[in-house]
Image: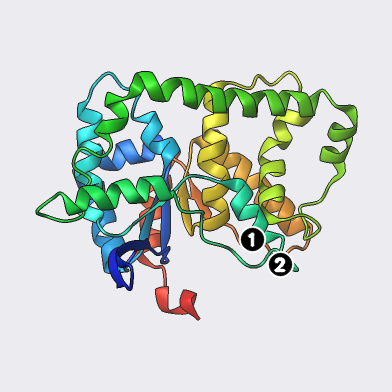
Amino acid sequence: MPIEFVSSPDGIRVRQSFVSPTVYLDHWALRLFSDDSELQDRLVRLLLQKQGTLLLSHISFAEFAKPTDRQHCISAEKFLERLLPNIYLTDFAYDKLQIKEESEQDNRRRFWPPADLPQLKLFAERAQDSPLGFTMHGFISMAHDHHPQLEPVTLETVHVIRDGIEACREDPIYVHKSRNVLPDDKRTRTYVIMGELMREFVLDPSLAITDNDVIDMLHAAMPINCCDFVLLDGAWASRVAKMKQRIENAGSDFPIAKCYSKRGDGVSQFLRDLESFDSVACSK
């Protein structure tokens, strides 16, 4: 069970597990499955039937702080309520994931995303105050209610990352390395993925880097590293496809998530692939 209370000598604790098939939804996809009852029914049925996990990030919650219509938050809460307890909360702490990856000889092994312990603690405390136990009711709405406090923090993080990318592409040495480096086992999974996702921006100085680009990159980087299935914006799904091709050309054994967008038949293909996912084979 992904999120559960367990007894310990120190009392009751909460823990979460990242059980395959694991899924991550970019903001547009989370909104889509929240608003489309037919798609929602199918995803909920498949993920619960296969005892999988939906990965939720603090970035996802922060994006719900923006809409003026509070109903978007409520719709998302109702959708996620149906998936409980099959969720996993992460804070996208790349430094923690990087430390784990540095202990590996190659890039075949995939680690769980770092847990968002403050969010998990809050989620557990709210469950103890609810007669129904774990609940998403009001959880996302808190981000909406605290928009004035959350927005400056989110923008500060985004601008630090954007400034870092700008500095990289103004550095001739970094640009030369980015043009020639291979996505192989000489670097950790996190370094390879971040470098590949940034590569187009680094090599093309005329390509503007917007705040949304940075947020979309955050939606992509850790989920494609750790998950089985990821739904992204079309441009970023294309970048992931290019990265997969470069990894294949480099001859590296480097598993990453299957990636989809809303272009073409992407959402339906995701659901078909999830339906055919073999949890037993994956666990061996």
Location of residue 208 with respect to 108 vertically, above or below: above
Location of residue 220 with respect to 148 vertically, above or below: below
The secondary element bearing badge 1 is classed as helix
Q: Amino acid at mark 1?
A: Lys
Q: How far across and how far down the image is residue 243, in percent?
A: 67, 48
Q: How much space separates mark 2 and mark 1, taking CA atoms? A: 8 Å
Is 265 in front, or is 243?
A: 243
Residue extending furthest left? 131
Q: Amino acid at mark 2?
A: Glu
Q: On the picture, is 68 further left or further right than 281?
A: left
Q: Quadrant of the N terminus?
A: bottom left
The secondary element bearing badge 2 is classed as loop
Point out which mark residue 100 bears. Answer: 1
Instruction: Give residue 64's quadrant in the image.
Output: top left
Can residue 262 be seen at all in this image of the molecule? Answer: no
Q: How far across and how far down the image is residue 230, in percent?
A: 47, 50
Q: How far across and how far down the image is residue 249, in percent?
A: 77, 56
Location of mark 2 (residue): 104
Circle 2/circle 1 CB separation < 8 Å:
yes
Residue extending furthest front? 10
Q: Residue at x 55, y 51 (%)?
A: 224
